[in-house]
Image (cartoon, rainbow, N blue to C red):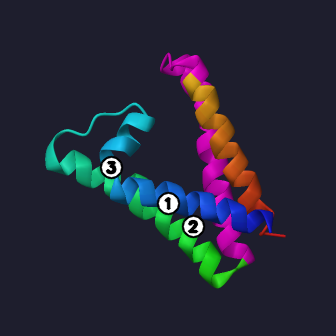
Amino acid sequence: MLSIIGAALCTAMGLLGVLAPHRAARLVSIQPIGGLGVSEIRATYGGLFLAMGVTCLVIQSPDAYLIAGASWIGAGLLRFPSLVLDKGSFPKALGGAALELTIGALLLTGAA
């Protein structure tokens, strides 16, 4: 059940990227430049997340949950060195890490 919540959150994040790319860009503090920039947000923050979430929901494979969960965990963990290396915004980066680690952990419950 927890893995389904993680997959649903992943899917929702993907839908945000596909349907509202400018809103998704503001959420992660980036600015798309021109049509290519908007396309990149739709593809990465939309298509990638949407495909991961829907794949987990549809095929219910432990391997799919493992890959999706590991991807979210990887993103969350890399926020920490980025705080130092990139002088990231501390409160917002921690919030992003918390969200990514939570989604990743939820997804990994389906890998067992």
| 1 and 2 marks in contact (CB < 8 Å) | yes
- Residue 20: percent from left, percent from top: 34, 51
- Residue 49: percent from left, percent from top: 49, 60
Hey, which residue is sitting farthest left in the picture? 34
- Secondary element under disc 1, as helix, strand or loop, is helix
Q: Nearer the viewer, residue 55 or 21?
A: 21
Pick whichever of labels 3 and 2 is earlier in the sequence: 3
Is the residue marked by circle 3 packed among few (<14), some (14-19), or many (20+) residues within 10 Å?
many
Hey, which residue is sitting farthest bottom in the picture? 59
User: Is residue 89 one of those drawn in magenta?
Assistant: yes
- The amino acid at mark 2 is Gly
Q: Between tags 3 and 1, which lies in front?
A: 3
- Secondary element under disc 3, as helix, strand or loop, is helix
Total marks shown come to 3
Q: Between tags 3 and 2, which lies in front?
A: 3
Describe residue 37's horizontal placement relative to residue 43 as left or right: left
- The amino acid at mark 3 is Pro
Cα gap from disc 1 to disc 2, whole angstroms: 6 Å
Residue beneath label 1, please? 49
User: Is residue 103 one of those drawn in magenta?
Assistant: no
- Residue 91: percent from left, percent from top: 60, 20
Residue beneath label 2, please? 53
Give the residues drawn in magenta, as a range: 62-91
Q: Which label is found at residue 21?
A: 3
Pick whichever of labels 3 and 1 is earlier in the sequence: 3
- Secondary element under disc 2, as helix, strand or loop, is helix
Hey, which residue is sitting farthest right in the picture? 112
Is the residue marked by circle 2 packed among few (<14), some (14-19), or many (20+) residues within 10 Å?
many
